[in-house]
Image (cartoon, grey):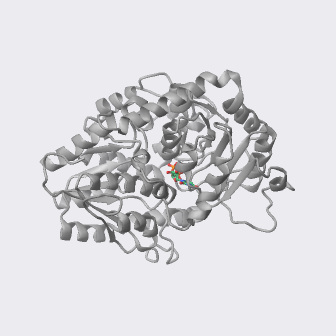
Amino acid sequence: METKSHQQLHIFFFPFMAPGHSIPAIEIAKQFASYSVKSTMITTPLNAPQFSKVTQNSKQLGFDHEIELLFLQFPSVEAGLPQDCEQYSSATTQEMELKFFKAVTLLEPQLEKVLSKHRPHCLVVDALFPWATNAAAKFGIPSLLFHGTGFFSLCASKSMLIHQPHLKLSSDSESVVIPDFPVEITMKGSDIPAYLKLNLENEFTKLFKSSKDAEERSYGVIVNSFYELEPDYADHFGKIFGKKKWHIGPVSLYNKAAEEKAGRRCIERSVEEVHECLHWLKSKKPKTVVYVCFGSLTNFSDSQLLEIAEGLEASGQEFIWVVNKEKKDKEEWLPEGFEQRVEGKGLIIRGWAPQVLILEHQAVGGFLTHCGWNSILEGVSSGVPMITWPVSAEQIFNEKLVCEILKTGVAIGGQQWGTFGDINVEIEASVKRVAIQKSVSLIMVDEKAEAMRDRAKELGKMARRAVEEGGSSFKDLSVLIDELRSL
Ligand code: UDP
């Protein structure tokens, strides 16, 4: 995968401290390393385990150059947080989340120091760190912004931010059409993410606005998507953004070794544990298992988890369900005798699941997802239809893409979501067991959904083609690296 030029490029990557941001950033850094680019990941000491596997093994993984780690000390205490709070998910109240973002901005002097010392050729920076673009500019270092979402939601967010269409509504239950958008997409006022409603003037609207301003100052944007998935929106984004953009995804598909995929986030789970669910899947017929997972941050109430359990059982389908809870003697969120009744038919994974490997398994035939962008792309890449249940951030736009444009999913009809800054607010039982049961049966076995399943399969093939030699994302990545070399 060598390109013509052998000039040693050195790129810094600086992802936000949450798995949905660090996982794709690691994948991108690995791709850069495979092009003989020296890649350095900036993180904080307590976030290091997520990165250490790839940094320790980069030679074994076949990269010419090692991926290095560089640490900034996270100013938790200065921002009023407990000392060990360095990951977004460990900010367990809304107040702590605000302090977390404050702590993040306090990293600026440390970032400046390392940029001034190492003078990398480019900084690939998370869109949640808008101030970092200024820090890089001080040293004449170009920044590439990484939003971690797709073109559809980038375009929709931009339109909402510019036009503020909710201001024309007299109530949140009325609907608007997304202005200046390639197709007609209708949204209820209450569906528009709060961080896009500038009249609310809170820390999150400010953060999002500064992130968009940073986009203007950046050299360009890296997008974890592939052209064939959302061509109209990739083109539209090019027009409204007016800057350079490269689509280089799905980055999860670049990950070749199974062990590497299993340990994408951390090395806490042993290989045996990882193999337990894969072993279980081996005993299942193709396309018979629905995989249920709500990402790394979703916090459902016990009553909502109970509805999910009842709905899954009533669907009669086999399932793997990832629940962000530790095993306890008495579990309020599980119906009496649930695990005994579903034994052999359903598997609950408490904690972290090897999601990519599960989704890629031939036994998996559907995905109930919270619509985090990484999960959506991983579902698309695996060619499975999805049940969409957005809970926060830009996930509502991702649902629209899957259900209304790609037509490879069904919306479950969730009514409650947050923005950033309330990931820890427990989500009450807005989705009832009947809706869960019906949508699971629909995507898994209903004849009516056959066309949807076929389309999903086709998209999965397109995703794989995009990252193969000569594919659209493969080409865009080498164009990007050549361009960085020529700067
Ligand atoms: N993930 C995983 N195992 C889990 C939960 C999540 O491997 O048990 C991974 C998933 O594959 C994805 C990332 O964590 O790559 C979550 O990112 P996403 O954008 O889907 O959602 P977020 O967690 O940011 O809400």
The answer to whether residue 487 shows anywhere in this view is no
The residue lying toward the viewer, choosing from 430 and 18, is: 18
Q: Is residue 426 left or right of residue 110?
A: right
The residue lying toward the viewer, choosing from 151 and 374, is: 374
Q: How many dots with numbers?
A: 0
Location of residue 432 with respect to 186 vertically, above or below: below
Residue drawn 80% across the image and 49% down it: 342
Q: Is residue 197 left or right of residue 13?
A: right
Residue drawn 61% across the image and 52% down it: 278
Coordinates of residue 287 in the picture (x, y in percent): 64, 36
Q: Residue furthest right?
A: 336
Residue drawn 38% across the image and 42% down it: 249
Picture quadrant where residue 36 is located: bottom left
Q: Is residue 476 left or right of residue 208?
A: left
The answer to whether residue 484 shows anywhere in this view is yes
Coordinates of residue 102 in the picture (x, y in percent): 43, 65
Coordinates of residue 169 in the picture (x, y in percent): 56, 30
